[in-house]
Structure formats: C-alpha cells, structure tokens
Image (cartoon, coloured by chain):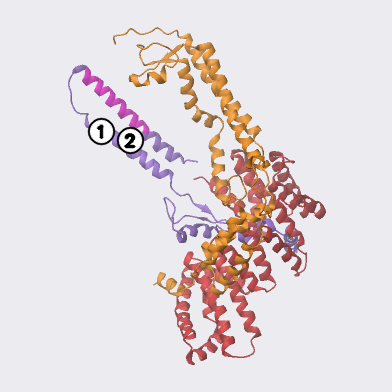
Chain colours: A red, B purple, C orange
Amino acid sequence: MSDTSIALNNFLLLGSSGAFANFEPEQLLSNHDKLEQFLLSNGDSLSTLELYSLYELQFYLALLTKHDIEAKAMLDRLVDQFGANAKSQRLKLLQSIYLEAIGKRDEALALVNKSPNELKLARRLVTFGRKADSNDNEDYISTLTYYLDLQPTDLVTWSELGHEYSKIGHYDKAIYCFKEILLQDALIYPIFYKVGLNYYYNFLQEEKNLKTERKDKLLELLNILINSRNNYLRAVEIFDDYTKAWVGIYIITQLGSFNDKLKKLGDGGIKEVKEYLEYNEKLSKLSDKRIQELAQPEEYAKILNDIKK
Amino acid sequence: MAKSSTLVTYFVGLLLLVHSGYSSYEFHKLSAITHQSSHLPIDILVETLVGIIVIVIGGFNSIENSSVLTFDGREIQPDYKYLKPIEMKDSVKLIERIGTSDYEELESRLPFIDIVGKRKKYDEWVKSHQD
Amino acid sequence: MSTPDLLLDPQLKYWVLLPISFVMVLVGLLRSNITYLLQPGPKLEEYKAIREKQFLRRAACFRQNNGVLTTEEFENRRQYLIEKLNSTEFYAKVEDPNAESTNPLSDPSTNDALMNMAKGNMMNYIPQTLIMAWVNYFFAGFVIMKLPFPLTDGFKQMLQTGIETPNLNVRYVSSISWYFVNLFGLRPIYSLLMGDANAAAELVNQQQQQQPLPNIGGPGGPKASKLFQAEAENIQILTHKSIFDGIVDRVLDQHA
C-alpha cells in the first residue's frame, strides 16, 4: 500500500480515537503541520467521508495549536457541507467548542443549552461547571453525577467522573466509576489497569495515615493491595503485553517496609498473609521478566513517572 | 486501493483462463466437425491450471496487511503478513504499538476536552521555546 | 428448427426495448430521491425515555458482567439496583395502574410510524403501477426480442405474458415480460448509479456504534414496570462468582 494510504489510516485512527486530546503541545503541532500538508496534497483524492473526518480532526488540531483562522475555515467547511441549521449535535458541539476557545463563553453556553433532549450537547454543557485554574472540582463532579443520573450507560462520562474523583483523592469513588464501565464491557483492559492504579493510590493514602501496627488495620490494607494486584492481573490476563499493568504489579511486589510488616504477621501464623507473600515472590519474578521483555528502560521510567505523578 | 502488482497478476491470470477457455471451445468445435472424439490436449489443461493458480496468488497478494504508522511517526510492520489475529490478546497488540487502544475514547474523553486550558498550555509551551 | 423464425423489426430495439429499460432506470432514481426527501429526519427521543432504557440496560449489564466486582461491591450494587428497579424513580412516565389500556392507534408516536410505513409503500407501488400501465397501454402484445440462447418450455409463462400464442418459441420475449425482467434485474444498476456501496458501508458503521436498547413503551412493546420488575427478580436470584478468584494462578499458568 502506498504511503498516502498509510498516512491516511493514521490520521483517521487519530481522529476516531481522539487520542490527540492527551497529546503534548509539540506532538500537536507536528501532527497539525503534517495533516495540513496532507490535506493540501491529497485532499482531492479522498472520499467524502474521509475528507470530512479529516477536516474535523484538523479543526481540533488547529484549535489546540492556536491556528484560529484555520480552525474557523475547517468549521465553515463542515457547516457548509452539513448545514448550519441542521439538527446535527456533532456540528453544534464543534461550534460551541470553537466559540469557547476564542473566548465567547456565553455564546458557547447558549449553543449547547437549548433542549434537554439533545444529550450530546447536554454532556458538553456539563463541562461548563468546570472551574478554570483551580483544583476545586466539586461543582463539576456534581453536574457530572447529575448527567449520569440521566444517562446511566454513558461510559465516557463515567470515565471522566472517575478521573475527576481520582484527581481529588477520592479513590474509592473513582473505583466505583471505573467498575461501572467494566460492568458494561468486561474486556476493557485499560480500565482494569485504572482500577488497579486507584486501589494502589488508595493503599498509599491509607498507609500514610497508618499509625498503629495493629493486625486488623494491616489486614485491611492488605485487602486493598490484593484488589489492586488482582485488577492489574486481570488486565494482563486479557492483554498479555500490557506493560503498564506489569509495572504496576512489579511495584506492588516491591513494597519493602509494608511487606516486612506483613512478614511478621505471616510468621505469626495468618494463612492468607503467608499465601499472599508466596504469590508475591512468584509475581515479582514474573513481572520483572515480562518488563525486561517488553519495555525499553526509558519507557519503563516514563510509566513509573506516570504512576508516581 | 489495490496494489499494481495485484492488478497485473489478476490480469495475466484472467487472460490465461480466457485463452484456455477459448482454446477448448475451438477444440470441441473442431472435433464436432471431424467427428473424432479425443481428450482435451494437455497444454490447454495446463494453461487453465496455471491461470487459476496465478489468480489465487493475486488474491493472496491483495489481502496482505500493510504497514502502519505509529503516532510518533515510526512505520511498523504488523506481526502477521496475511489476515489478522482473532484472539483478543493478539489482536490488540497492533493498535497498542501504534500508541492508542480500542478504548481510547475513555482515555481521551474528547467531548469533555478543556479547550481553554489546553490552549493555555500550548501558549506556555510556545513561550518557553522562544526563550 | 421446425418452426420458421419470426422476423422482428430491428427498430423495435430502439423504440421499445431500450426505452422501457431507460424509463425504468430513471423512474427508479427519481423514486429513491423522492423517498429520501420524504423521509423525516431522525427525531430526538425524549431524555426521560432514554434514561429509562439506559437504566434497564445498566441493570441487565450488571446481571451479565458482575464477575468484575468483588463480593462486597456486588452486594452494594445489588441492593441499590433492586431498590431502584422496584421504585418508580427511573420510569419515563408513571402510569396510573387503574387507567384502562389505551388504544395504540390513538397514540401519536404510533401514528407517525404507521404514516412513514404507508409513505414508503406508496412510493414503491405508485410508480411501478404507472410504468406497467404505460407499457401495457402502448406496447400490449408486442414481441420485442429474441433471446440468443435456447430455453425450455417452462419459461414460457415468464417470458411471454400478454401474448396468446401457445406455439411460439420460448425464446421470444413480450414487452410486459421485459418489464418484469427489468423490475427484478435493475437493482445492481441502481446501486451502481447511486454509489450505494458507500451508503451501505456507513450503515454498517452506525450499527456497530449503536448499542441495542430494549424497546419500552413503543408500539407492541412491553410496559416498563413489567420489565423493571422482571429485572429486579432476576437480580434477586443472582449468584456471584468473581473473576478474581484464583486469578494469580491463572496468570502464573499462562506464563509457566
């Protein structure tokens, strides 16, 4: 297959996955420039569907890299094709995002706040509860939960809510949200990883507050850790080469001080602790081996960084 | 978007098939006129078989997996040359290597994008690069 | 052959055979365009109805995938779902249990669906009837072509409708039969002319994205309260088996 179609597939995947929403500025700019070139040289030979998908992608990329005029041009093309007064929620969503980006927040708000039946737009309306420049996202969370009451199977919103809870340290609630996604589709391995990660954070949080070395407290902590480990394991059970989850497992097995405390308990004759430590050893070896196989050192460092944030 | 080599193989194969078909038609007509019944000459048979094989080769050629671009711009070859794996743990490998996953929308959460914040971040990046 | 060949005027080809096909193609295109224009755009469903469906779906998913939960989470969610399913909180509209069942024909939403169906059918039948009348009026009893290959007598009825000549060779085709052959044979040509392959591909894409939601309150659908209660009962008797039981051994085995 030619270079053109390879590049085209790459752009289409980028657009449909929305992965660019988490890109770094540098990556955004390079993708924007590449796509601009691509559209100039190949725009004529694309099918309508491909062309307008790319216009939509370029709209986002241009807006994110502050090429406002180009973004407007892309938006106008989409509007010309699909009609300004059409009932398309997708188009209105783009218009609203554009208005918000150029600072006309009120107009953007008015655009999405028309009918309660336009659920895609209502979802965008929820984001207006977000406060800029502050970590206080209580309002945002409450609007998200309100929306989820109306749309209990909207996975993207559950995911957003989970991330918001995770941000402010309500890991148990974040886990609840992510589990809700898993209930809808039990094979989403990245979410299993997320659940495991949140359990791990939860563990760290609890451990920090731990004053005593009482047995039942330690067992409670162990339970959290086991949950975390199990979710990581489920992720790698579904997708064998999932490096992040292997790193997660590895970190859990290397918890020095906590494991020492557990060892005392285990020696005290508690069966489940003993079992856990045995498994720990095996998993430690296995995950170490898998990480060596899968990841380059710099990738490993990056994942570690992400986990520690 | 078929490759040109595929088209050539299809064309050659079809040509061979049509030619062998026409030859056998002529042959039967001839034997009807001369009232001699004999078997089809071996060269026509061979031509038919070769034609079919060439077309099959072309068919295989056309389903070859193409290489893909990762999001950081490297070109990678899929693990399998033909067809795609059906087991989940194998089938998701390719898209993970590209740098995303089938469930990326849950990760990117595009409908909730904080456009103002992202643009601010971009501004800062540009400024830090100018200095 | 024993019967002498009929001599067909070559002009028949240009003035009857091709015009019939041509007119049919054009009318077919016109029809598909008009149908497209008559189609109402997709209507937004009321958010409350969607909420009701989605909640039911959430409950059904819980029933299917509860393995991803730990026992504690399972019990919490089960309590919650049973409670909500037995209340009326998620109903789109709370119905008076004493009200008599309404006539489905007086319901405006049903009427809409019926109207659409009627429109589609009309667009199918009217043009076909018109063309058939046209062919019958102008070319009744015409023998318009001779097929270049022999056929058995079984095809007589199909190819020679409208001409009363029992002994005519089957290879001759009458005008009205030509119309029928066109009627059934032109579909691939339409899809070629309209670029339907693209539309078909898009249709497939859409189907993949849309998750099936149960039909509640629609014409012929069961009542929400019944569905909710049934789901609550299902969840009540659910047994929980977590996928995390023995997961360490499974993963270790996988890599053994």
- Name which residue type carries label 1: Leu
Q: Position of residue A281 (x, y in %)?
A: 46, 81
User: What stretch of residues is rendered in magenta?
Assistant: B14-32
Local secondary structure at mark 2: helix
Q: Could you tell me which quadrant the C terminus of chain B lies in?
A: bottom right
Chain where mark 2 sits: B
- Residue at the location (76% across, 59% down)? A128
Which residue is under mark 1? B45
Please tell me in which quadrant of the rendered image residue A219 appears.
bottom right
Res. A240 visible in picture: no
Label 1 vs 2, first from the N-terminus: 1
- For label 2, count other residues whose C-alpha is less than 10 Å away and answer few (under 14), some (14-19) or many (20+): many
Which residue is under mark 2? B51
C7 relative position to A172: left or right: left
Please tell me in which quadrant of the rendered image residue A163 appears.
bottom right
Asked whether A139 or A26 is in front, the reply is: A139
Q: Position of residue A250 (x, y in %)?
A: 52, 76
Q: Is residue B24 magenta?
A: yes
Chain where mark 1 sits: B
Q: Label 1 to label 2, Cα distance in Å?
A: 10 Å
Q: Position of residue B116 (x, y in %)?
A: 75, 59
Task: Judge whether B39 appears above or below A148 on screen.
Answer: above
Q: Position of residue C188 (x, y in %)?
A: 49, 30
